Amino acid sequence: IFTGSPSLKKLVDTYQPKLTAEEQAYMDNEVQTLCTLLNDHDVSVNRDFSKDAWDYMRSQKFFGMKIPKEWGGLGFSTHAVSSVLQKLATQCFDANATVAVPNSLGPGELLVRYGTQEQKEYFLPRLADGTLIPCFGLTGPHSGSDATSLIGSDCVVTERNGELGVVATFKKRYITLAPVAGVVGLGLNLRDPDGLLKGNGDEGFTVALLERDHEGLRMGPRHMPLNAAFMNGTVEGEDVWIPMSSILGGQDRCGFGWNMFVECLAEGRGVSLPAGSVGAARTVTCGVGAYSRVRKQFRVPIAEFGGIQEAMALSASDGLASIAGVDLMNAIVDNHEAPMVISSVMKQKCTELGRRIVERGMDVAAGSAICRGDKNYLGNAYMSLPIAITVEGANIMTRSFQIIGQGLTRCHPHMLDLMQSLQMPQSEEKKAVEIFCKQFHKIVGHGLTNFFGSIGRGVNATVATKTRSKTAYKDGDKLLDYHEKQLLRLSANFALTADLCFTLGGSLKFQELLMGRLADALGAIYLGYATLHHYERRRGIDGLEAVTEHAMLRLEKEAQDALLTASDNFPGMLGPVASTVMKIGCFPLGNMTRPYKNPGDELSKEVSKLVTTPSEMRDFFQENLFMAPEGEMHQVSDLVRALPVCVEADMIASSLRREKRQPTEAEADKIAQADAIRDALIQVDVYEKFPTEMSEGYVRPALVGTEERLAELDRKNFDAVA
């Protein structure tokens, strides 16, 4: 995208996310069984899982999915781990978070890649079979989204009794699984003032591995993140002695933590957190989609109301974009790539999409979504999504400087070489000047290419959009061809704008409003390519064209609006010049070359119908949704199974009204069956007493007060009569 000419064909040819037969069997059996052991409401009330659930996660290696088989793990792909997390999120967000950490932010993969042989032999089998539950201690009170600053997490190299090690003081918080973890990967800022490392290892970000009983280590206290029940707490210690044998990778890997962190975080941010959002999307499209057909107001299913249709259509296209983005990201990681920038995009975009999807689901489900209990399948997700927004780099920070700040250096085709030339030693000055001049000329050429490319593509895109039929998307080939050309145009616009950012020099890092808008554009373009990549792989599903069109129109509009706002507010001394160049390049004919609009009402109604009536698109969204066995009370499963019955009954009732006749016995039975199902499914949980009211003799304080006031009133009346 930063080049201005990305290739959809390369994406399709290179990245093919899929599960092996072994991984699919695990989904169908072990993951399904774990979901049946979890009651989301009970978990939230008890603030913990049952011991049976913990034991099952351990024995079935849910904490060792990414550990290779030779060390006792499952050796699963990233796509398989993501699929497990998605399904768990459709039943219990706390289970999703609990399983995610050991398979992304836990030290398991880092041990495989960087651990010493002794560390691997000791830790990996114990992590694989769940003997040791891991956590990763990075964030502290003074280092949040800038966690790698490691403020307040210091260690100094020293020697004790002839053994080299470090003395560390640290105060970590927000550490998921810390209250129950058996081992912690601890991020420390290592200093070697006396030169004891002697060139074997460096100062800086270093990772230590400490077991729970390590002398001086304190783990156990819990935070209470909103209403979530997953374990989260503190890791602290003062003047803790850590031998070099406990440094991950040994002394050689002192100061190597940033490299480890990049690989670790790419998976945690770009895979685990978006997987939860996909789980939320599947729950809303399937559960709330069915509810909107089951629930009636004014004797009409609420799915027929325009406001509900708008919410369901938006949720469906946001859900499709999230699924597509996750599938592509998983395939990229499984291709042994560590895409830090795309990881940040995925974290920020997908968690935000997940929040919007659940908010719309809450709006549609209304009262049934706010009364807590076994029947409420949205409330805990609604309270959990803000946590996903906050962790692993708060979205507001990720959007406003991380994505573009890292993207311009890591993804621009020429910038990294230019920056490295500035860091070359004095002895290579001549070579450095040559490289700098060469890369500078390439950057200028790159900008000019994208400037003229933007103009040409902009005019062509405008003509194609203005002359395009509203039903053109029904032809899959035309759908792909049209939207790929729009993304190429937007990519050239984005690449031109990225080049213009260099006019700001070092002050760019303070222009967070500009970087936030460019992050919006980059995220929309990436998800657009992911959505087309997904369509190319999954085409053939009836209705996929409509939902893909809906998603693409919105993503293109988002990218266009972000670029327009950036051009209107380009900062800096050369801002007016950059703004003019950007407007000419991106929008050469003004408003005429800003052709993208949000989907029309007819398309939104079509998409809404696809997810509120039986369809292949509903089957698609249901693919990784937990369905309880028939006969067990499970609200989402019951809603999904009720949908065909209610739709059939509504069709019969409509036919009876149209034909002005009485129902047959079979028709009357079907309508009665649907009415009974509807009545059962719209009920909400009610409690005679809350757990805090169970103590013997407890009376609600308000009722005590009422009795006291009535007694006082009776006494006054008696006194008055007397």
Image (cartoon, rainbow, N blue to C red):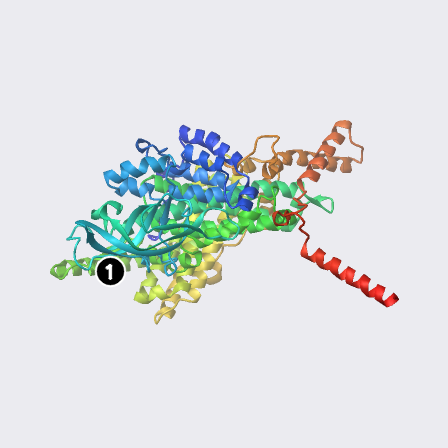
Asked if residue 355 is positioned above or below residue 85 in the image, the reply reads below
Q: Residue at x 55, y 47 (%)?
A: 380
- In this view, the residue farthest toward the left is 427
- In this view, the residue farthest toward the right is 721
Q: Is 652 displayed left or right of 252 in the figure?
A: right
Asked if residue 625 is positioned above or below residue 351 in the image, the reply reads above
Asked if residue 150 is positioned above or below residue 126 in the image, the reply reads below
Q: Residue at x 61, y 50 (%)?
A: 692
What residue did someone put label 1 on? 440
Can you tell which quarter of the image residue 334 is in? top left
* Residue 307: % across, % down: 63, 51
Can you tell which quarter of the image residue 128 is in? top left
Counting labels gives 1
Mark 1: amino acid: Phe
Q: Is residue 82 visible?
A: yes
171 and 443: which is toward the camera: 171
Q: Is 315 displayed left or right of 273 in the figure?
A: right
Mark 1 lies on a secondary structure that is: helix
In what quadrant of the picture does the C terminus appear?
A: bottom right
* Residue 478: % across, % down: 47, 42
- In this view, the residue farthest toward the front is 722
